[in-house]
Amino acid sequence: MKNIAVLGSTGSIGRQTLEIIAAHPDAFKLVAIAGGTNVDLIIEQANRFKPALVSVSTKELAEKVKIHIPEQTKVVYGLEGLIEVSIHEDVHTLVTAVVGSIGLRPTLAAIEQGKQIALANKETLVTAGQIVMETVDKHGAAILPVDSEHSAIFQCLQGENSKQVEKIILTASGGSFRHKSREELVNVTVEDALKHPNWSMGRKVTIDSATMMNKGLEVIEAHWLFSMPYEKIEVLLHDESIIHSMVVFQDSAVMAQLGTPDMKVPIQYALTYPDRFPLHTPRLDLAQIGRLHFREADFNRYPCLRLAFEAGKTGGTMPTVLNAANEIAVTQFLRSEIGFLEIEKVIERTMEQHDPIPNPTLEEIEEIDRWARERAKTLGRRC
Ligand SMILES: NC(=O)C1=CN([C@@H]2O[C@H](COP(=O)(O)OP(=O)(O)OC[C@H]3O[C@@H](n4cnc5c(N)ncnc54)[C@H](OP(=O)(O)O)[C@@H]3O)[C@@H](O)[C@H]2O)C=CC1
Ligand SMILES: CC(=O)[C@@H](O)[C@H](O)COP(=O)(O)O
Ligand SMILES: [Mn+2]
C-alpha cells in the first residue's frame, strides 16, 4: 500500500490522480490533500477519501470546510497548510499538482523528509531547479515526472546510459493558435486561447501552451530532471500529441514514447513505477490515424520559447524572473487586462530589467520572484 498526498487535488491533474487512487484501493491510500479555493470539491473529496489532513487557501475557507467533513480530519490552510500536507508522516509519495511557484516550499519540505515526488508542477523546477536538485541529491529523494513529455523521456531512458544521449526532442502541439499567423494574434480572445487542440487542462497551462511558454518551461524542466545541457534539447512541433517526446542516442537510434493524449497514463506511471498497472483508456490506433505531422518550432512565431531558452542558458535567477513574469502576465490576460501578444512583451521587458544573481539562495530566489511579479504587474498595467 502506497500512501499518497496531493497538492492541488481540486485541479485537472489532482482530480485525475484521485480517480487513479480510487481505481486501485488495494495499492494506494490518499492520506492528505490540498486545494485552493474550490471548497465544494475539497469537501466532496474529503468525505469520499477520508484523508487525515486537508488544506485550503485561507483560514475562513478552512472553517467552512471543517463543518462539512469527518471530525477526525484535520483542516489546515495557507502555505503552512501546503507544507503540512507535503510532510505528513504517513506520506510516501507527494503529487505536486498545484499551479505556479507556490509549489516550491512544500516540494522542498517533502524532499527534505525523503518523500518521493510525482512532479506535475513544472514551475517549481523552473524557478529553483538548482536548489531543488541539490536537495534531492542531499536527501536521497526521487522525482518521478508527471508532465507527459518528461514522463516520455524518462520511459525512453529506462535501461539506457544517459551519457550516451545525443539529444532529447520535446514535442509541442503548438497550442490553440497554431494555425494563426502573428498578425492574427492581435485580437484573439481568452475563450479561444483556452481551446487546446489535444489536451483538456487547467487554464494557466492552456494559455502557456498557446504562447509556447509551456514548452519553454518544459525545456528548463528537462534540463534539470535529466541533467541535459540546453544545446542538447530540441523542440519539435507535432500536431497530434501522439509522440509524447523522443530521445536520440549517439548511435543515431531514436526512442519515442507514444499514446493517445491522456494524462492518466503519466500520472499513474509516476505512482506505480517501475510497475505498470492496467488503465482503461483508448488504445493508439495508428492505422486509423494514418499520418503524424511535424514542423520546426520557430522562435519568431513563438518568442516565449526563445525567452525560455535564453533564461535557461543565462541561469541564476533569470528563470525565476521568466516564470514569475509569465505567471503575472497570464493572470492579467485571463482577466482580459492585457492582450495575448502583451504576455511575451511583459516577460521580455521584466527579464531585460533584471541583473541575474548566479547561484542564488532560496531567500534570494523568493525575493527576486516578488520583485519580478511587481515589475510585471506594472509593465502589464502600462500595456
Ligand atoms: N493539466 C494538465 O494536463 C497538465 C498540467 N501540468 C502542470 O501541473 C500543474 C497543475 O496544472 P492543472 O492541474 O492543469 O492546474 P489547475 O488550474 O487545473 O489546478 C490547479 C490546482 O492548484 C490549486 N491552487 C492554485 N493556487 C493555489 C494556492 N495559492 N494555494 C493552494 N492551492 C492552489 C487549485 O486549487 P483550487 O482550484 O481549489 O483553487 C487547483 O487544485 C501546473 O504546474 C501545470 O503546468 C503538467 C502537465 C499536464
Ligand atoms: C499534457 C501536457 O504534458 C501538457 O504540458 C502539454 O504538453 C501541453 O501541450 P503543448 O504544450 O504541447 O501544447
Ligand atoms: Mn507537458
Image (cartoon, rainbow, N blue to C red):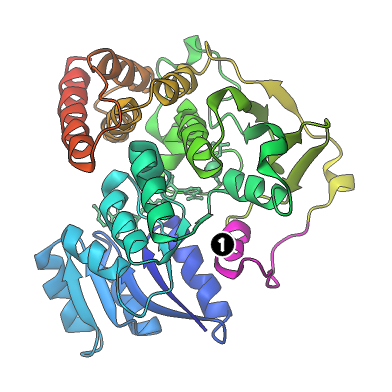
Q: Tell me: 22 left or right of 237.
A: left
Kindly identify the residue that appears in the image at 16 percent across and 82 percent down. 67
The residue singled out by tag 1 in the image is 270
Residue 4 against residue 346 in the figure, above or below: below
Image quarter (top left, top right, bottom left or bottom right) of the C terminus = top left
Q: Nearer the viewer, residue 60 or 90?
A: 90
Do we see residue 8 in this rendering?
no
**Image region (quadrant) for ligand 2:** top right
Amino acid type, label 1: Ala
Q: Position of residue 168 (x, y in %)?
A: 66, 33
Q: Give the vertical position of 242 relative to 62 (above or below).
A: above
| Residue 375 versus residue 12 in the image, above or below | above
In which image quadrant can residue 277 be found? bottom right
Residue 48 percent location from the top left of the image: 39, 83
Q: Residue at x 43, y 18 (%)?
A: 310
Mark 1: few/some/many CA within 10 Å (<14, 14-19, 20+): many
- Look at the image and give the residue range highlighted in magenta: 264-283
> Height in image: 258 above or below 97?
above
Q: Position of residue 234 (x, y in %)?
A: 62, 26
Q: Nearer the viewer, residue 173 or 55?
A: 55
Residue situated in front as seen by the camera: 368 or 295: 368
Is residue 243 toward the left or the right of residue 47 in the image? right
> Can residue 132 be seen at all in this image of the molecule?
yes
Please, what secondary structure does the residue beneath circle 1 have?
A: helix
> Is residue 319 inside the magenta stretch?
no
